[in-house]
Image: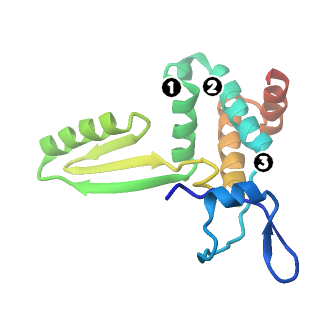
Amino acid sequence: MNEIYPLVFVFDGEAMVPVNGRSADRQYVVGESYRLAPFEERSTNSHNHFFACVNEAWLNLPIEQSGLFASAKHFRKWLLIKTGYRHERTIVAANRDEARKLAVFAESVDPFSLVQVKDSVVTIWTAESQSMRAMKKKRFQASKDDVLNEAAAMIGVTSSKLKDNAGLAA
């Protein structure tokens, strides 16, 4: 079966009627049962503006910080981790040498991860996905605000100024 994508339905008082019947015909089988759930639509404009703001901040990092992040994507993932939008895994290795090997492997698997070795303990942080599928509207907005506040502070401007400048650059 093909992947099912969210469709818009209108409740007519008795049934949920698809707004676009052709799309529904391609995705659903007559007589089958499907669960309906509310879908929080995220603004594409807000999503795109966020990425423009991160890029703008990355381009304006102070010289001593500019070499720390290979791309705006690296910068964004680092900011997500720093502001708490992350997954954390802790692994206890047999010894310090094994922990270092594990850390090298972890960094090769996800070059955007942050890895720390302390004695024989390896901690791996990875950024949460901000895809529209993975992060709902409310959490995305919170991550956007937190990340842009941090990015703005790093370049010495307010979050509002960063948002305005990114809007001009877009």
Residue farthest to the top, as pictured: 63
- Would you call the spot at circle 1 few (<14 residues within 10 Å), some (14-19), or many (20 or more)? some
Q: Amino acid at mark 3?
A: Ser
State left or right for residue 124 relative to residue 127. Answer: left
Q: Quadrant of residue 18?
A: bottom right
Contact (CB < 8 A) between labels 2 and 3? no
Q: Which mark is residue 69?
A: 1
Q: Nearer the viewer, residue 7 or 134?
A: 7
> Which residue position holds label 3?
43
Residue 66 position in % (x across, y down): 55, 20
In the rendered view, tell whether residue 49 sits above or below residue 9.
above
Query: Mark 3 or mark 1: which comes first in sequence?
Result: 3
Alpha carbon of mark 2 to alpha carbon of mark 3: how far? 23 Å
Closer to the chain start, of discs 2 and 1, is 2
Report, in whole angstroms, how far the alpha carbon at label 3 lies from the one at label 1: 28 Å
Q: Position of residue 11 (x, y in %)?
A: 84, 75
Q: Which residue is situated farthest in the front direction here?
A: 30
Please name the residue shown 76% across and 43% down the image.
Answer: 44
Asked if the residues shown at circle 2 and circle 1 are in contact, with their CB atoms under 8 angstroms apart, the answer is: yes
Residue 6 in view: no
On residue 58, the disc is 2
Which of the two discs, 3 and 1, sits closer to the camera? 3
